[in-house]
Amino acid sequence: MRLERRLAAVLRDLAARKAMSVGECLEETLLHTFEPVGDGVANPHTAADLHHIQELKREHGVDYDCHASHRFVERQEESR
């Protein structure tokens, strides 16, 4: 699976905070999105988690929202 590098960094740090592997954190998030709650879906994150996620997004330069993925463009990495 490929993830935008800044998003992957946020996920890695969030998983560490929750004492989970990245895979476990992804599974938890995905499973919650499959559960309807009212007009939305269940959220796996506490209010404290959401606050911390916003801090991680700033720290890692995530300057896009949840609808941005369809606009991502992969660039070739330069040879070193």
Image: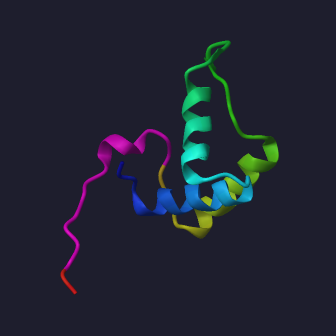
Q: Is residue 74 left or right of residue 19?
A: left
Vertical position of residue 52 compared to residue 77: above or below: above
Q: Is residue 8 left or right of residue 10?
A: left
Toward the viewer: 21 or 45? 21
Residue at (49% x, 56% y) in the render: 7
Residue at (31% x, 50% y) in the render: 72
Magenta residues (range) = 65-78
Q: Is residue 69 left or right of residue 22?
A: left
Residue 68 magenta-highlighted: yes
Q: Magenta: predominant secondary structure element?
A: loop
Q: Is residue 3 left or right of residue 9?
A: left
Looking at the picture, how far across and down is residue 9, in whole percent? 53, 63
The mark tally for this picture is 0
> Where does the C terminus fall, quadrant-wise?
bottom left
Looking at the picture, how far across and down is residue 33, in whole percent? 57, 27
Looking at the picture, how far across and down is residue 17, in whole percent? 73, 58
Vertical position of residue 69 compared to residue 58: above or below: above
Residue at (62% x, 36% y) in the render: 28
Residue 57 magenta-highlighted: no
Looking at the picture, how far across and down is residue 39, in whole percent? 62, 14
Question: Which residue lies most toward the top here?
Answer: 38
Image coloring type: rainbow
Vertical position of residue 16 compared to residue 34: above or below: below
Residue at (48% x, 58% y) in the render: 8
Toward the viewer: 74 or 26? 26
